[in-house]
């Protein structure tokens, strides 16, 4: 197949949501519909013994939450779908923000009982910055939730995007009968099934068909016809281009846990979702159809397989064809890199591939050469831009509880920091190590993984720090003078960049006023 055909076949998207909206459950069901798995796992369930595919880390199984982005690829109706299940918990937002740079569109899950929640608003802001196309899936209709019209109004107000319903629910909670597909004008009535796909599906070409009363009862049939008339009267015809420009969000209703409404969304998604798009670099825009390969690393995960201690870099392919065993220019590095072990994922399960195309996400086995934000090309020196990094908000000192395991601790901290789980600062005086994170839960994850994966035991002691500021100056003499006078507060990050550790907002302001030649940066761009 030609490169253009391969590009047309691909859809790469992330699933985002506030914690507990049903993101991971929806991921499982998409895999089930795509034929990638035979039985769906459950995030929290006593009856279902299969864990979910995307929450495969030990801590995720214990907590019932996602703490790392999972990448899964599967085929559906001739379309290659690359799906990224992101953590919803705000403490892992950094992983999610970086993942959003590697996808072309987003499915946002909203709980019909709770409506739009705070984390959804933050994630939506990131999508708005890039005009990422968004599809909205309103979940958990098997529970008594809020009125569909009210939910749509809330999405429009809080997330600042126009909605366009493409499916509509019949009933809710105990009286939930199914969904009517406004895009294809078909009505599907489902029987609830949490594990396997049900083949029983009633399809109606016409909502005015008298058979409808027999199946869902006269009152529901009347209500559905009124709703459909109202929606078709209020909303103009759905314009795919407005969705692709990020101006309107198609809305689907369903219940992921019961396989309701997912088919409608998936069938519409493969018709309207964007194929791989162009990407900005520091020198030019890169088009996917270009012959020469280019891509960037947006995530690194150490110890995906605890038996092998491997480290995998996740690479988003932006242009050309990526081939196994071919040397590629590592823009930041001293020499070209060649990868003999190139995998595509099904969460933790991997298969080795020989080539991949724009939109695909591949795993590269790496011994420590790659970092988040690195660009690989077929010769050209350019860097893909827009991969965010955040100034930490909470700081804790690392205290080693077992002096015999110092080496393991050093290695563990180095690898976890390279994953972008948190940031590590080492003070010039006393070599004290301080971990900075965006959220409290990250410390528990770091502690758990250091113990489980590296056999290193640590405690985290609170530190009275307000901000970590990266410092630079055009005047080297001034910079040296500043470092000398403030040496108690000077640390280095893992890339050996100078960092000023400020104890309070007012004190930082005073230091900035006293040293006008020093520039203080609040993010260390990767």
Image (cartoon, rainbow, N blue to C red):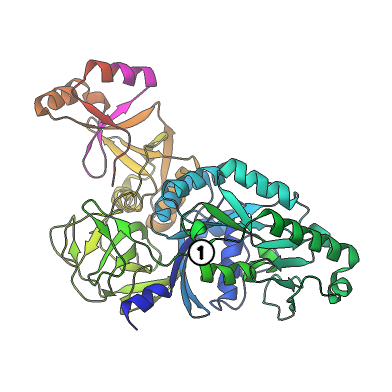
Number of callouts:
1
At which x and y percent is residue 290? 26, 69
At which x and y percent is residue 84? 47, 62
Note whether residue 127 is visible.
yes
Q: Is residue 43 magenta?
A: no
Q: Is residue 508 magenta?
A: yes
For the N terminus, which image quadrant? bottom left
In the displayed structure, would residue 438 be above or below residue 374? above
- Residue at the location (59% across, 74% down)? 32
At which x and y percent is residue 372? 31, 54
Choose between 128 and 302: the one closer to the eye: 128
- Which of the 4 image quarters holds residue 101? bottom left
At which x and y percent is residue 282? 23, 51
- Residue at the location (74% across, 61% down)? 228
Query: What residue is disc 1 on?
Result: 56
Q: Which residues are magenta?
A: 490-510
Note whether residue 93 is visible.
no
Going by the image, does 526 lie left or right of 27?
left
Choose between 272 and 522: the one closer to the eye: 272
Going by the image, does 42 lie left or right of 475?
right
| Element carrying mark 1 | loop
Tag 1: Cα neighbours inside 10 Å, few (<14), some, or many (≥20)?
A: some
Going by the image, does 292 lie left or right of 57?
left
In the displayed structure, would residue 89 be above or below residue 30? above
């Amino acid at each position: 197949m030609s490169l253009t055909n391969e590009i047309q076949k691909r859809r790469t998207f992330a699933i985002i949501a506030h914690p507990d909206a049903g993101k991971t459950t929806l991921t499982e069901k998409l895999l089930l519909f795509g034929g990638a798995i035979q039985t769906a796992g459950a995030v929290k369930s006593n009856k279902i013994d299969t864990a979910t595919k995307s929450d495969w880390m030990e801590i995720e199984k214990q907590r019932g939450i996602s703490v790392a982005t999972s990448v899964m690829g599967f085929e559906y109706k001739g379309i290659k779908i690359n799906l990224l299940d992101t953590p919803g918990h705000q403490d892992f937002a950094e992983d999610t923000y970086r993942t959003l740079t590697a996808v072309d569109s987003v499915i946002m899950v909203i709980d019909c009982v709770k409506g739009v929640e705070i984390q959804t608003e933050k994630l939506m802001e990131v999508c708005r910055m890039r005009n990422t196309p968004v599809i909205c899936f309103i979940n958990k209709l098997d529970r008594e939730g809020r009125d569909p019209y009210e939910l749509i109004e809330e999405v429009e107000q809080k997330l600042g995007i126009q909605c366009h319903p493409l499916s509509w629910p019949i009933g809710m909670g105990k009286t939930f009968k199914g969904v009517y597909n406004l895009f294809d004008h078909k009505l599907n009535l489902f029987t609830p099934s949490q594990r396997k796909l049900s083949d029983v599906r009633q399809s109606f070409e016409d909502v005015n068909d008298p058979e409808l009363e027999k199946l869902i009862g006269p009152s529901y049939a009347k209500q559905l016809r009124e709703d459909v008339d109202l929606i078709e009267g209020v909303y103009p015809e759905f314009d795919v281009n407005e969705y692709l420009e990020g101006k309107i969000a198609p809305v689907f209703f369903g219940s992921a846990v019961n396989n309701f409404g997912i088919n409608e969304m998936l069938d519409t998604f493969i018709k309207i979702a964007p194929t791989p798009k162009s990407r900005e670099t520091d020198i030019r825009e890169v088009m996917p159809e270009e012959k020469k390969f280019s891509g960037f690393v947006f995530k690194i995960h150490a110890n995906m397989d605890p038996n092998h201690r491997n480290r995998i870099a996740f690479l988003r392919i932006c242009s050309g064809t990526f081939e196994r065993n071919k040397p590629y220019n590592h823009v930041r590095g001293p020499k070209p890199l060649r990868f003999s072990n190139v995998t595509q994922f099904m969460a933790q399960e991997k298969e080795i591939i020989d080539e991949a195309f724009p939109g695909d996400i591949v795993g590269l086995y790496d011994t420590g050469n790659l970092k988040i934000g690195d660009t690989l090309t077929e010769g050209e020196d350019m860097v893909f831009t827009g991969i965010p990094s955040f100034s930490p908000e909470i700081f804790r000192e690392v205290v080693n509880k077992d002096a015999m395991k110092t080496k393991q601790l050093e290695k563990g901290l180095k690898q976890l920091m390279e994953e972008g789980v948190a940031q590590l600062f080492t003070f010039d005086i006393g070599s004290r190590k301080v971990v900075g994170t965006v959220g409290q839960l990250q410390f528990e994850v770091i502690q758990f993984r250091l113990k489980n994966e590296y056999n290193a035991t640590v405690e985290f002691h609170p530190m009275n720090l307000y901000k970590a500021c990266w410092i630079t100056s055009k005047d080297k003499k001034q910079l040296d003078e500043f470092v000398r006078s403030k040496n108690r507060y000077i640390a280095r990050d893992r890339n050996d960049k100078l960092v000023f550790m400020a104890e309070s907002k007012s004190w930082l302001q005073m230091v900035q006023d006293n040293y006008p030649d020093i520039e203080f940066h609040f993010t260390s761009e990767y």
